[in-house]
Amino acid sequence: MIRDSYIKTVIEPFKIKTVEPIKFTNAEERKRILHEAGYNTFLIDAENVLIDLLTDSGTSAMSSKQWAGLLDGDESYAGSKSYHRMHDVVSKITGMKHIIPTHQGRAAEKILFSIVGGEGKVVPNNTHFDTTRANVEFSGALAIDCLNEQGKHPEVIADFKGNMDIARLEEVIQQYGTDRIPLVMITVTNNSGGGQPVSMENIRQTRAVCDKYGLPLFMDACRFAENAYFIKTREQGYADKTPLEIAQEMFSYVDGLTMSAKKDALVNIGGFLAMNDDDLALQCRNLLIVTEGFPTYGGLAGRDLEAIAQGLEEILEEDYLQYRIKSTEYLGRKLDELGVPILMPPGGHAIYLDAKRFLPHIPQEQFPAQSITCALYLDGGIRVVEIGSVMFGRTENGKFIAPDLELVRLAIPRRVYTQSHIDYVIEVVKHVHDRREELKGMRLTYEAPMLRHFTARFAYVD
Ligand SMILES: *Cc1c(COP(=O)(O)O)cnc(C)c1O
């Protein structure tokens, strides 16, 4: 029991020891700042942001024990004490035989796919995260998403919208043949699919398909603890298990994993790659030495390894996870009650506004989600990110091709903002929604040839 049953309020399960002031700006100043940033929130200086919901990656607040760990970190080049501590914690949670630290998640992906990827290869996943897709494709391989049907519809309410489409996975395996598929991946929670969880049953079914065809299964484990908590609260048979036990079962079905410690390890930098296969681990370590560092630090300082080890212990605490999932849900539920269209149900790490329903008067080629992103900054100094036509739209033969979903993501940094910050966010979103008919479409004035969303510049359409 983590709280008395007669109390309904879920509170932040920590008290604040260090504070960082945030800067208030007025509407006039924000208008100038946004104009100077070319109406792209990536180009606004963090100092000029009041509430920063750009990402939950690397933005967590560390605990006093993590900060203490920084001082305690062992900076020996080889075999440091901090490596052993991190190794032992990761091994306890994942059961993996080989644990290889990397400087962040994409470095783990780069090493893995440099070895197993390549021209002609095919990697299926429930939904590839952008860096995973980029690393698969950079190796010359093809990245294929096999998301279940429910996950493709923002308004559908279901427990596990992040699930792999098992039939589709089998189709892909039969279509390309096992020789071309070095491994299958499953991403928990499904970040690009709205932070939606994957059920234990679905992980088990994915394992069964991999066994049938003799393929290894790897997990993109960035938000494994949030996923474990969703299983605990939504899947039959798990209510009485601890998040650690659930995570251990999740990992028992896979042969390896990639991890960005910037998510569910509560640190500002770090990651790792883990696996059971001795031969693959040897090849990964050899490449790691060339690109990251010696196998016991892999691109990190000893103190970073110490903070990861401590963060991985804290992330599985049940009162933390309850607060985390409930506070994200609080934001989603309040917005839904106010009639603001969001991707339902609320995910683990973020709430997504559905810009197509929010601004039906602006066509996708005029970037409605970008227009909302700008309005949230103008009206309240809140920074969020567009996940729609700017990020995924493209033009072919002069014709604009829109992505299926047009979203604005409000990602919640871990342990950073209190409920009153979130109440402020709700008020600002409502304000923007109330004046939605005044919002204008946008056009690009500059775009880079690749990953244009980071540096694009815009103007309003008259
Ligand atoms: C963040 C993320 C990554 C990449 O990790 P970085 O540490 O940012 O390199 C990979 N997969 C998923 C699902 C992620 O959320």
Image (tube, rainbow, N blue to C red):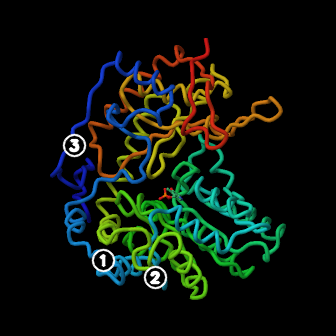
Q: Which residue sits at x=57%, y=50%?
A: 192
Kindly identify which numbered label has been placed on residue 20: 3
The disc placed on residue 82 is 1
* Alpha-carbon span between mark 3 and mark 2: 38 Å
For mark 3, does the 10 Å Cα neighbourhood hold few (<14), some (14 to 19), or many (20 or more) residues? few
- Residue beneath the point at 29% across and 37% down: 421
User: Which amino acid, mark 2?
Assistant: Gly
Viewer-nearest residue: 257 or 102: 102
The answer to whether 217 is drawn above or below residue 271 in the figure is below
Q: Is residue 376 left or right of residue 280?
A: left
Circle 2 packing at 10 Å, graded few (<14), some (14-19), many (20+), is many
Determine the image quadrant of residue 206: bottom right
Q: Is residue 363 visible?
A: yes
Disc assigned to residue 95: 2
- Amino acid beneath label 1: Ser
Instruction: Give the Cα distance between marks 1 and 2.
Output: 19 Å
Please report contact status of discs 3 and 2: CB closer than 8 Å, yes or no.
no
